[in-house]
Amino acid sequence: MLDLKELLIYHCIIIFLFFLVLGFYLKKYGLLRINKSGFWIYWSGIIFFLINPFLALITGNLEVYEYNLNFFGEGYLNRIIWILVNIIVGYVVFFYFYIKQQKKYYFEKDMDFINFHFKLKIRQIIIIIIFVFFSLFSIIKYRLHPEIYIYGIEWSKIIAGPSGYLISAHLILYFLIIYLYNCDKIFKFIGRAFLIIYIVLRMQDPFDRASIVSIFLALLIIYYLNMKNKGNMRIHKKIKLAFLSILSFFIIFILVFRGHEEISATKYRLGLLNEELKNNLNIFINADTSMLAYFYSWSKAYDMEGYEFGIPTLNKIIFGWLPRKYFPWKDEPTRILLGRDELKYDYKYFKIFYGPKASILASFYSYGGFIGVIIGMIIFSCFCRLVDVLIYNKDVAIRAFGLAIMSELWLILGSNDYWGLQRVIFFLIPCLFLMRRPFSLYPLDKKINRLEIKRKYHCIKKEWEG
């Protein structure tokens, strides 16, 4: 009988070969570029399902894996093989439909990102001011003082204080920064000022590191798209892109070492760098990055207790914005439809569900096991292809909406469905207000948008050739 270490070695070998073949296939279609959703899904999978178990093996730190696989007191073999099959099939299904849809939007292969110098109107400026104040209120009031709500958490539910939506309203400012970066020079400068404010404030929050990394990734995508324009291939643009890339990796490094602690703990943690390499790598192997390990335990829990068919997610989308302090019944629809509480609120599974995430594949698994993974990845692939199209949209608000989602895809893959949907909702709210035709579906008309972009592209191309 193979032990855990041997099984993880075989897992890493198979996953490595799978992603290697998949990488060559994606390169053939030009999808390994940072302006493609497939790029972020591909590399996120490598980080969560290959690099993490590989680091656990070379450091010998298998505690997270042992805990999750031993949680039900059964052997390792069947569960590791079963989840490996789910991951591979899930990725094959995702990229099959993702590439199949590529043909519908062929124009992206032959065009550059066109920077429309958009000037804001008074209506949009007023809306931005309102949203900025609301977002800053959320950050200063709740995110910088988590004790207001953290002591009111019971079994992962916020039973006292604000709702999870109000606590996460900083994402509106996240969207506005990206939006302003796509406007003319004055508002782009304001966007940079907001960026500095956002980073400074978010660095003080011990319970969030990801949004700081993601906003740098969003800027990387914007600079990359602008660099693709023939007229923008200047050396200072390349230097700026390289600097931003290095800064992004440095920020990731600092935040990983900080963990979920105050920023003052960073200096102490960086002192660990003087220790041997093995101990340093252990910092990168914890519950925050061990999606594969928690996928093992989550999937087993759903197999034993029954699948949830997306009912808790739907319930949270409808009632999640209500504070449980005043609306204690908000979880009742899930209880009525499922005949039980959502598993993450069951005290028997509290230790594996509270805090860590098991990737969006585990969420899809809760919809209906293996079939749920297939259906979920099909829907997710359609969503990602839509995001690819949105970043070329002529409406700056919709373009910012697409860029904001694309910069967060690596997190959405490593988190769960509801967490990802919550972010999409927060990006969508200001987008609907800031669209040139508020709440209109006109800018989403792909045919009109495609013809307009192609016309503008050919006009610019003639100027270059002339």
Image (cartoon, rainbow, N blue to C red):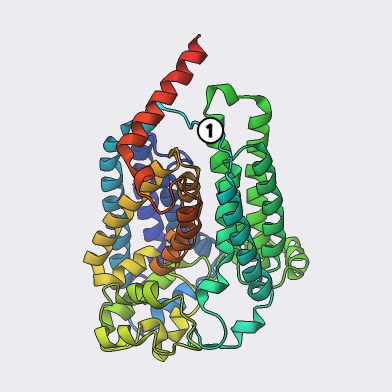
Q: Position of residue 198 (x, y in %)?
A: 67, 58
Q: Quadrant of residue 296?
A: bottom left
> Who's the residue at 45% across and 76% down the image?
66
Foreground of the two, 418 or 14: 418
Q: Position of residue 253 (x, y in %)?
A: 65, 56
Q: Quadrant of the N terminus?
A: bottom left
> Who's the residue at 42% across and 59% down the image?
413
Foreground of the two, 432 or 215: 432
Q: Position of residue 109 (x, y in %)?
A: 38, 30
Q: Specify the amino acid type for callout 1.
A: Asn
Q: Count the marks.
A: 1
Q: Residue furthest top?
A: 466
Residue 369 higher or lower than 210, as above or below: below
Foreground of the two, 342 or 433: 433
> Who's the residue at 36% across and 39% down the image?
26
Q: Is residue 196 left or right of residue 252?
A: right
- The residue that label 1 is drawn on is 115
**How many C-alpha atoms fall within 10 Å of the one at disc 1: few (<14), some, or many (≥20)?**
some
Q: Is residue 260 left or right of residue 318?
A: right
Decide if residue 3 is in sight here. no
Foreground of the two, 28 or 411: 411
Tell me the element at label 1: loop
